[in-house]
Amino acid sequence: MKLKRFIVPGIIAGAIAVALTMPIGADDNISVSVTPLVLSVSANIETVDYGTLPYSPANDDRSTDESSAITVTNNGSVPTHIDLRGANAEALVDGQDDWTLSCDPNGLGTVGNNLFVHKFGAGSSVDFNGSGIFTLCSDSSKRLASNVALAGEAMFVLQFAMPTGTNGFGPRSSSVTVIAVAP
């Protein structure tokens, strides 16, 4: 019986202490928000047709043509970097050679048999003999513009340099990929 006298008051005292330390009817709200990260760009031109070009006589004497200015718009939800990547040129006629995109040495590339160069420069009017010209590569991308604002734009011009020779005279098709990169 003596044991009961000590246990019951101890349990009652513990319950009262717990009840006194618990907030009664207290609550608090934390407001949270989130914006989805959307990386999206669009180009105002979907196709560039360089037409018919003669072969380059030599690497240091290239046959080239340039595109009109291409505008890329940031359609995403955040400012973005915009990169460009090139690709090899596929023969559109069976049995003819594909062309390999050359980007070495950096900024120049090399034209040769089945070897072509695709360059770009930022802006609406580009001097391809000046600075700020980049050679597109198929295995890595090059930065066109950094931190382009929402609905902001970046412009560039492409230059295509023909190989010195190939098998077949049919058209070739290549692509330039415009990439939105999170800053």
Image: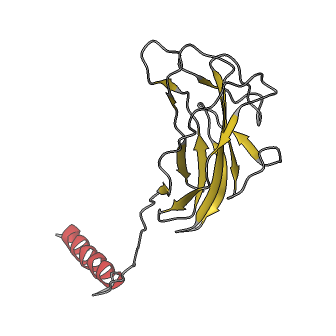
Viewed as shown, does residue 180 lie left or right of 29? right
Residue 65 position in % (x across, y down): 66, 40
Look at 82% across and 44% down and name the residue there.
129
Please state the total of marks drawn on the protein image: 0
Residue 33 position in % (x across, y down): 41, 73
The image quadrant where one finds the N terminus is bottom left
Residue 120 position in % (x across, y down): 68, 45
Figure colour scheme: secondary structure
The image quadrant where one finds the C terminus is bottom right
Look at 75% across and 22% down and name the residue there.
57
Residue 173 position in % (x across, y down): 50, 31
Q: Residue furthest left?
A: 1
Look at 62% across and 31% down and name the residue there.
53
90 vs 50: above or below: above
Q: Residue furthest bottom?
A: 25
Quadrant in the rendering for residue 66: top right
Residue situated in front as seen by the camera: 73 or 162: 162
Residue situated in front as seen by the camera: 49 or 179: 49
Look at 60% across and 48% down and name the residue there.
83
113 vs 83: above or below: above
Quadrant in the rendering for residue 86: top right
Residue situated in front as seen by the camera: 120 or 91: 91
